[in-house]
Image (cartoon, coloured by chain):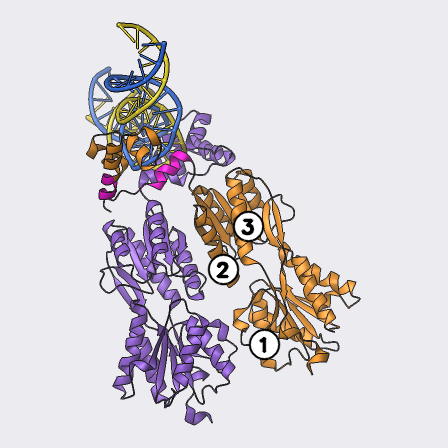
Chain colours: A purple, B orange, C yellow, D blue
Amino acid sequence: MKKKVSLKDIAQKLGVSTALVSYVLNNQKEGRIGKEIAAKIRDTAASLNYRANLIARSLKTNRTNTIGLIVADISNPFFSSLASIIETEAEKRGYTVIFGSSHEDGSRFEKLVDTFLNRQVDGLIIAPPANSEKQIQEILKQDTPLVLVDRYHPSLNTSFVTLNNFQASADAVSHLVKSGRKRIGMITYETTLFHITDRKSGFLETLKKNGLPADETLVKEIAMDNRREDVEKAVEELLRGDSPVDALLFATNRISDCAVKYINSLGIKVPESLALVGFDEAESLDLFHAPLTYIRQPLQKMGDMVTGMLVDQMNGTSTISQKVLHGELIVRKSTGSPDTVN
Amino acid sequence: MKKKVSLKDIAQKLGVSTALVSYVLNNQKEGRIGKEIAAKIRDTAASLNYRANLIARSLKTNRTNTIGLIVADISNPFFSSLASIIETEAEKRGYTVIFGSSHEDGSRFEKLVDTFLNRQVDGLIIAPPANSEKQIQEILKQDTPLVLVDRYHPSLNTSFVTLNNFQASADAVSHLVKSGRKRIGMITYETTLFHITDRKSGFLETLKKNGLPADETLVKEIAMDNRREDVEKAVEELLRGDSPVDALLFATNRISDCAVKYINSLGIKVPESLALVGFDEAESLDLFHAPLTYIRQPLQKMGDMVTGMLVDQMNGTSTISQKVLHGELIVRKSTGSPDTVN
DNA sequence: GGCATCTGTTTAATCGTTTAAACGAAAATA
DNA sequence: TATTTTCGTTTAAACGATTAAACAGATGCC
């Protein structure tokens, strides 16, 4: 690689000290620098195509202006949109984002955290995988500013931005109840991830409050890797048997995706004989004849907030703060009342 | 922030030199280091929770083990999948990815390139926006290893990995011709981006070769921001009038998305009265009654290759190489022959 | 016993910045 | 004229690692 131009090169060429060059190029010591020499320095810098070595600067200043972002799966539109927003917001505030995708895998996650800390990121934004409490605590011990997003660990005292998942499920169920559904099922993941278990609690609690059946057989939990067969089996189990459900809640967009396609292929009438609600948009279902009622997460706000909170933490302006945002139930055809529809 | 542990801290605690600590922790000078002291050093490092400061190392070694990735739009599934693959491949080879999204905007792109170069990335992978030749040339001048992906500038001598877009269009058209279509239209972007214009050339040339009408009125070019109205207007123009088309080729998944939804809403029969082909998968159309025939790009191969080529370039193993991959036409119902269908 | 070799460790320079402090010269003040 | 200020610039240390070269002391060889 061609040797890069350094402050020294400029200084030598002009017979001045590197300090002076540094001051000029950083617009410091405003009044105190000779105009002609300042101009000359700027000219030479431009003509030599000088670019500051941020690595050297970081070493000296102990700041990298870099945020590490670890999401669960960058190829999931939920996270890629969020990443895009965070990147934009970070850039506005003078930070670059480096990113990694844990694929919900603990050891991969650990490795990413390690890499990012070694790289001296100024702060971290993380959507933590299941059972990552220990690693998160390590980060806290290092005093690296940290904000969790989407998920959090209730046992840990960290900053986070998350959805009120309990409420979101509750809203979904209330809506189904109001539109006349009597036996409501849910398909979710088998996991300890709090945001997911919260969705389940909200579901069950709200059923009880409405005096509807709320036993565990109404909740099917599939493995996190979201295999199509698992989803189809779950749908099957909830729809067959002596007391089939008349409505279904899906805990994630990935689940909605598989489930709705399967339901479509079975020729089941939605919303006449089955109502459907999901979490997050599932673009893949745009053309489903009965567009899905779903819980919309305020992505822009979430990304904006999480970035702002991290920056405040990095500046020492604030310490720990925890935000719970509200989802919005977007009602569409998939939950039309069975009475009014026919 | 808590002060971080450095080599010096370990050295002082044990009364040895930092050099020794460095040698031990990097497993250098294998045979020559005392076993007990080595063990002690490792122990202390672990107990103090030492982590190497990669910034300092980079300054000294002049390598950051970082790859800068600039895509056109990270929230487009094409790019987020590609980014995910590149990240995995880079990690395998010991590199971290920092990323940015240009949103097809020249000035944003320029800023990203600047940031990344200042951060001393070891190499760049870029899907360049239109009219970015000058900036790309700047990078080449700096001798920073660079591989373009998805798109490239024919006028510049850079490494790249791209699809044979001409051939892909040609395949699509041939297929339509074989299945009996007589008047084929295309909706694409108004842009100088080579991979897009190449798709258009492939389209027109193949029409001519088959003796079909191939005038410019059959190609509708819409603005890159892909507004729904523009797409709908284009569809409208191609379908109405005295000689409507009986088949359509869409240059990108974003276009397919809008166009197919509109066609669906118009109640036009696919494939009976209109055949459709698109570039790339458009998940959003999964439930369209006539699944779209499309050109599949070998994403995994593309990501793998581009990363490998960049790493080779960074190691000095190779210089410039240019790869053109082949798309695969996935034939589905949307191009069923009009004769055989009824 | 004298000299070379090996072993285990230290010395010290360096990467490219930043920045407090020092400095000499010119200008202002007494 | 002597003294203080101000101005413009330089000096030099520091950030945390890497690494060639130097260096004692032990061991081997003839």
Q: Position of residue A249 (x, y in %)?
A: 38, 79
Residue B262, numbered circle = 1
In percent of width and height, residue B80 lies at 48, 59
Residue drawn at x 72%, y 68% as measured from the top left: B217
Residue B330, visible in the rendered structure:
yes
Q: Which residues are magenta?
A: B43-62
Q: Position of residue A316 (x, y in %)?
A: 25, 51
The numbered dot on residue B81 is 2
Total numbered circles? 3
Give the quadrant of residue B175.
bottom right
Residue situated in front as seen by the camera: A265 or B120: A265
Please tell me which residue lies in front, B262 or B55.
B55
Is residue A6 part of the magenta span, yes or no? no
Q: Residue B47 colored magenta?
A: yes
Q: Are marks 3 and 2 in contact (CB under 8 Å)?
A: no
Circle 3 SS class: helix
Closer to the N terminus: mark 3 or mark 1? 1
Where does the image place residue B112, in percent across and percent down from the top left? 47, 49
Give the quarter of the image for residue A21: top left
Label 3 or label 1, whichever lies nearer to me, is 3
B34, above or below A267, in the image: above
Label 3: few (<14), some (14–19) or many (≥20) C-alpha neighbours in 10 Å? some
Q: Disc 1: which chain?
A: B
Residue B50: mark in rendering: none
Q: Earlier in the sequence, mark 2 or mark 1?
A: 2
Residue at horizontal 48 percent and vertical 78 percent from the top:
A262
Check disc 2: other Cα within 10 Å, few if <14, some if 14-19, many if 20+: many
